[in-house]
Amino acid sequence: MTTQNIFNVIIIGSGPAGLTAAIYAGRAELKPLVLAGQKPGGQLMDTTEVENYPGFINGIMGPELMDNMAKQAERFGSKILPENVESVDFSAQPLKVKTGKTEYLAKSVIIATGAEANWLGLPGEQRLRGKGVSACATCDGFFFKGKDVAVIGGGDSAMEEANFLTRFANKVYIVHRRNEFKASKIMLKRSQDNPKISFVVNVAVLDVLGEKTVEGLKIKDNVSGAESVLPIQGVFLAIGHTPAAKIFATAGVQTDEKGYIKVRDNTKTNIEGVFVAGDVNDPRYRQAVSAAGMGCMAALDVEKYLAESI
């Protein structure tokens, strides 16, 4: 393992938060290093058309948007490497970030590793991601006008997603593996009172059907064992997210009870010189534009931190 020179800032992650941070840090002539991972671009790389990101009147494909961000970051002097971070050591300056190839040193670090939606692991689910299978109703609900869709889950997020989707969809099914729900009483009642929402409970989801687009949801009754197909054109997963923060928590970065990185002042973590941006800190909004905004904030905070540290 080799050791490099000390960077002003290392940005871990290459979604909207990480690349926006890189653009701002690059413009501040901090010459940031972006460790993008083996799958650069974050969750938008699995998204087809993005219509809610400002500035694109007719929308833009998710991979194209992320490619544009990366090229813009490089234009301002960012160095982007497709390396996965395996461990970090934030116990002293300089901060250490280790990949499989190299130990990098930095005066500051921005954590922008995001959060991954929890999936059921079904063959059709993975095949049809971005083609009718989604984990974000506010991102993709617009594309399901007049269609029948299913929301899988039983918590407040599932209820919120279902109610939001009724603005566009013809019919929304809430599919849950049990009869009881984790959702709050008020959120559950709101869904029960919505004439566009129906409940399909005590069932196991076996697969998402369809070749090029979603055509149905194969389910099995947990009591009778009978299998059936729910005829739908869209599936929304609402079974939670997992923030990519484990290696940082191990290194002493404070997280909340769900594993999201906590901040003590704007984008600052509890460790001097370590900042955070995007979905790894945000269990609520989880939007590309809000992540990008946090990336901007983190870069500005880093610039101020480094100026005051000299």
Image: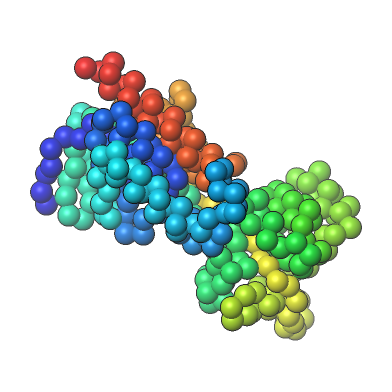
Q: Is residue 10 visible?
A: no
- The quarter holding residue 82 reads bottom left
Residue at image position (83%, 48%) is: 190
- The quarter holding residue 306 reads top left
Residue 67 versus residue 277 in the image, above or below: below
Q: Residue 202's spot in the image, x, y percent?
A: 74, 69
Q: Nearer the viewer, residue 255 or 301?
A: 301
Residue 287 versus residue 224 in the image, above or below: above
Q: Residue 297's spot in the image, x, y percent?
A: 44, 29
For this view, does 221 lie left or right of residue 264? right
- The quarter holding residue 213 reads bottom right
Residue at the far left in the pictured view: 2
For this view, does 122 lie left or right of residue 277? right
Q: Is residue 104 visible?
A: yes
Residue at image position (89%, 58%) is: 195
Residue at image position (48%, 50%) is: 115
Q: Assign the C terminus to one quadrant of the image.
A: top left
Q: Residue 241's spot in the image, x, y percent?
A: 54, 52
For this view, does 277 lie left or right of residue 183? left
For this view, does 194 lie left or right of residue 81? right
Q: Nearer the viewer, residue 72 or 246?
A: 72
Residue at image position (59%, 58%) is: 135
Residue at the far front in the pictured view: 57
Q: Residue 294's spot in the image, x, y percent?
A: 47, 35
